[in-house]
Image (spheres, rainbow, N blue to C red):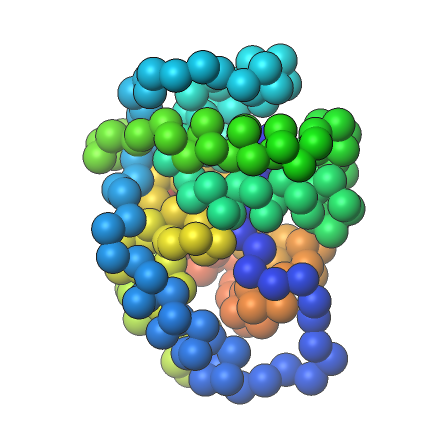
Amino acid sequence: MRIMTNHSQTQESKRPSMGTVWRPVAAAVLLAMAGVAGAATKTKVVSGPTPYRVSSDCAVCHGMHGASTDYNIIPRLAGQHKAYLVMQLKQFRNGHRADQNGNIYMAPVAQGLTTGQIDQVASYFAAQRPRMQASGVHHAGAKAGKAIFMNGVTSEQIPACMECHGANAQGASTFPDIAGQRYRYIVQQLTYFHNGTRKNELMNQIAKNITVPQMKEVAAYLSSL
């Protein structure tokens, strides 16, 4: 499974201002973020039964406990918000997530899941608690990436990522936890949002003006958390 951010289902033909796009959403998200668990790249096992579909399908790529078996483009799922995981699995199932990896890998798996199984899988991975420990992998540009994440680039109409994902990049509800997420996965998904391959009204607007070097800087910062 490959999963990352989708905050809405449609695109608008007319681009709204930055304020109308993200400030109201950010305010609501930040109010909901109290008590969100920390992010990391290593996990500890949480006791309880493992859903059959996790062991039969998900674990092949994401690992039994959501740490992912590949440190490149397979995202970690451990500790991710259940609401976000449910939303993404349903979008893979109904074809709304039409990016390349979604079509090749995730759609066939999600189409075989019932709504009940989606809930079970999402609950399982959300319950895997990541440790507050950096990945140990460092990429150039993390300092510049932190500045973009925290403050945005006003002159280029790029809002601060923390407005929706929080100062610690932990997200809330359907806004994903992206702290400690895989570097290449973040770059890949920002590229999809930038060119419209991955449809999401809010992220398409935010990523429209971001450059490839800026994507890599943001990814360098987030993957270092």
- Image-quadrant location for residue 78: top left
Residue 152 visible to the viewer: no
Residue drawn 52% across the image and 24% down it: 62
* Location of residue 69 in the rendering, given as x and y in whole percent from the top left corner: 49, 19
* Closer to the camera in the image, 85 or 220: 85
Q: Quadrant of residue 159?
A: bottom left
Q: Do we see residue 150 in this rendering?
A: yes
For this view, does 90 lie left or right of residue 152?
Answer: right
Provide residue 209's location: percent of width, then percent of height.
55, 71
Q: How many marks?
A: 0
Of residues 223 and 165, the one nearer the viewer is 165
Q: Nearer the viewer, residue 215 or 179?
A: 179
Whole-percent x, y for residue 198 in the image? 67, 54
Splitting the image into 4 quarters, where does residue 81 fall? top left
- Residue extending furthest toward the front: 116
Q: Residue at x 67, y 62 (%)?
A: 9
Quarter of the picture containing the N terminus is top right
Q: Which residue is at a point 70% across and 29% down the rendered structure image?
A: 113
Give x and y (percent) for residue 31: 31, 67
For the C terminus, give its image quadrant: top left
Q: Could you tell whether 36 is left or right of 79 in the image?
A: left
- Residue 169's place in the image compared with 129, above or below, is below
Residue in the picture at 47% in, 41% down: 82
Q: Is residue 26 above or below residue 43?
A: below
When the figure is inspected, residue 23 is found, relative to residue 39, above or below; the finding is below
